[in-house]
C-alpha cells in the first residue's frame, strides 16, 4: 500500500517561504499519496473544552473531521509554519488545541495509543527575524504533543531572517530534513 504524506501549511502567503519549501519537498515524496491542508483556508473552530471527547470518539465540532481522518492515516506529517508573535499562527494553534480529542481518548477513555498508525513528523519554521529560541519552543510543543499522538518529531528545518530577505534555501539542509523524516 502507498504511504501517505500530510502537509500542514500554516502560512497564509501563497508565494511565501513556506509555499516555496513545500514545492521543493513534494518531489521527494513522489512515491507517496500527498494531501495538503492550508490551515487558513481550513479555518478551524477553537477547542472550547466542552468535554464531548472525554466521553465520545471525535469532537463536538465537525469542521475538522476529514482533516483528522487524513491525519490518522498519514505515515508522514510535515508542518510548514511561520512564527507569529513568538509562536504558531492562530489557525495552526487551533488545530493543535483540537488534538484534545486524542488526549481525551488516551487519558479519559483508555485508548493507548489513541491513533493506531505511527507517524514520522518534520517541522519547517520560517521567521522574520532570528527567533531560534521561539522555534525551539514550537518544536518542543509538537514533540510533546506527538508523544501521545503515536508520532515522533524526527527533524526540523529553520529559516530565519525572512523579513529582510537575508535567507537562502539551503539544499543540503533541505535534503537532510527530508532524509531524516523518511528514516
Image: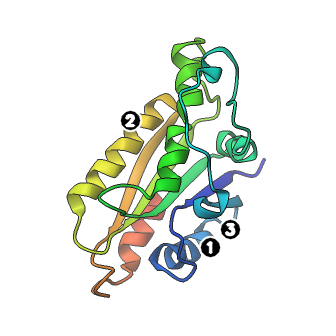
Residue 40, quarter of the rendered image: bottom right
Residue at 65% x, 44% y: name it.
71
Question: Regarding mark 1 in the picture, which secondary structure is present there?
Answer: helix
Q: Position of residue 125 (x, y in %)?
A: 38, 64
Q: In this view, which residue lies farthest toward the bottom?
A: 165
Residue linked to disc 1: 27
Residue 116 lies, in percent from the top left, at 64, 28
Q: Residues within 10 Å of mark 1 (few under 14, many from 20)?
A: few
Left or right for 177, reference 53: left
Residue located at (29% from left, 58% from top):
86
SS at mark 2 in the image: helix
Q: How many marks do you count on the picture?
A: 3
* Residue pictured at 33% horizontal, 70% vertical: 127
Q: CA distance from mark 3 to mark 2?
A: 29 Å
Q: Earlier in the sequence, mark 3 or mark 2?
A: 3
Q: Which type of secondary structure does the marked residue at label 3 adopt?
A: loop
Q: Nearer the viewer, mark 2 or mark 1?
A: 2
Distance Cα–Cα, label 2 vs label 1: 29 Å
Where is mark 2, residue-wise?
Answer: 144
* Image height of 160 relative to 149, above or below: below
Image-based side of 172 in relation to 115, left or right: left
Residue 42 drawn above or below residue 110: below
Camera-side residue: 91 or 155?
91
Label 2: how many Cα within 10 Å (few below 14, some 14–19, many 20+) = few
- Residue 149, percent across and down? 53, 33
Q: Residue at x 49, y 80 (%)?
A: 16
Which residue in the protein does label 3 denote? 30
Amino acid at each position: 500500500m502507498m504511504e501517505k504524506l500530510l502537509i500542514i501549511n500554516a502560512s497564509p502567503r501563497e508565494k511565501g517561504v513556506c509555499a516555496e519549501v513545500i514545492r521543493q519537498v513534494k518531489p521527494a515524496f513522489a512515491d507517496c499519496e500527498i494531501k495538503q491542508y492550508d490551515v487558513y483556508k481550513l479555518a478551524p473552530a477553537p477547542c472550547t473544552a466542552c468535554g464531548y471527547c472525554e466521553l465520545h470518539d471525535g469532537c463536538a465540532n465537525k469542521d475538522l473531521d476529514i482533516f483528522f481522518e487524513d491525519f490518522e492515516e498519514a505515515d508522514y506529517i510535515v508542518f510548514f509554519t511561520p512564527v507569529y508573535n513568538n509562536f504558531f499562527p492562530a489557525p495552526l494553534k487551533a488545530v493543535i488545541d483540537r488534538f484534545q480529542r486524542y488526549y481525551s481518548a488516551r487519558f479519559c477513555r483508555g485508548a493507548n495509543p489513541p491513533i493506531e498508525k505511527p507517524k514520522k513528523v518534520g517541522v519547517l519554521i520560517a521567521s522574520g527575524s532570528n527567533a531560534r529560541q521561539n522555534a525551539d519552543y514550537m518544536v518542543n510543543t509538537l514533540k510533546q504533543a506527538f508523544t501521545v499522538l503515536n508520532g515522533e518529531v524526527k527533524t526540523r528545518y529553520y529559516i530565519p531572517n525572512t523579513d529582510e530577505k537575508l535567507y537562502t534555501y539551503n539544499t543540503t539542509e533541505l535534503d537532510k530534513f527530508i532524509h531524516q523524516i523518511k528514516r
